[in-house]
Image (tube, rainbow, N blue to C red):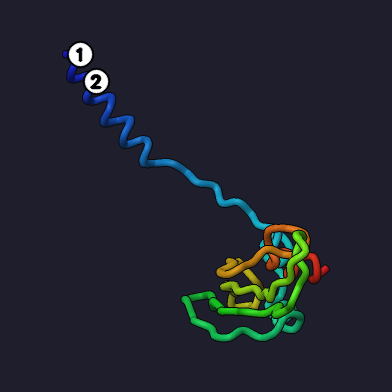
């Protein structure tokens, strides 16, 4: 009987461990841009490269911020930022997912420096 209890308890534990909830960490980029107009974003940082309709939203592939910067370690680097920008039918930004990034002048993300610090 105890072996049966151990097996059933193990099965229940395995089933419950598969049901984990992962909370999404909000990025400073999303904190700043979600809810704002995509027109404002594209006017400030350049138009998107392409777009794909996805039901009630459009996903834009964007790349911009081409620049040569001096890194914290004193070296120079050519940088840019790439992102997928999800926009509602009303042209409001719903999500920005960075797809390519490099270290910036003051931190680990050039995209954050470009899209948040320079946007303000």
Q: CA distance from mark 2 to mark 1?
A: 6 Å
| On screen, residue 43 above or below 12 | below
Q: Quadrant of residue 92?
A: bottom right
As drawn, the label of residue 36 is none
**Would you say 15 lies left or right of 70 here?**
left
Q: Secondary structure at mark 1?
A: helix
**Would you say 80 lies left or right of 97 here?**
right
Q: Position of residue 22 (x, y in %)?
A: 50, 46
Residue drawn 16% across and 13% down? 1
Mark 2 neighbour density, 10 Å: few (under 14) some (14–19) many (20 or more): few
Q: Position of residue 84 (x, y in %)?
A: 56, 73
Judging by the rendered image, the residue that carries numbered circle 2 is 6
Residue drawn 80% across and 70% down? 118
| On screen, residue 87 above or below 4 | below
Q: Position of residue 41 (x, y in %)?
A: 72, 77
Front-lying residue, 101 or 45: 101
Q: Position of residue 111 (x, y in %)?
A: 68, 67
| On screen, residue 113 above or below 64 | above
Residue drawn 20% across and 13% down? 2
Judging by the rendered image, the residue that carries numbered circle 1 is 2
Residue drawn 53% across and 75% down? 57
Front-lying residue, 109 or 8: 109
Mark 1 and mark 2 in contact (Cβ < 8 Å)? yes
Q: Secondary structure at mark 2?
A: helix
Instruction: Look at the image and tell me in which quarter the C terminus lies.
Output: bottom right
């Amino acid at each position: 009987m105890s072996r049966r209890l151990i097996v059933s308890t193990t099965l229940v534990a395995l089933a419950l461990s598969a049901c984990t909830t992962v909370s999404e960490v909000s990025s400073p980029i999303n904190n700043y841009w979600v809810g704002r107009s995509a027109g404002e974003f594209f006017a400030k940082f350049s138009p998107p490269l392409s777009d794909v309709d996805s039901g009630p939203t459009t996903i834009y592939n964007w790349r911009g911020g081409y620049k040569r910067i001096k890194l914290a370690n004193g070296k120079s680097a050519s940088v840019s930022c790439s992102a997928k920008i999800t926009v509602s039918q009303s042209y409001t930004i719903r999500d920005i997912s960075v797809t390519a990034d490099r270290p910036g002048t003051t931190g680990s993300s050039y995209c954050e420096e470009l899209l948040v610090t320079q946007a303000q």
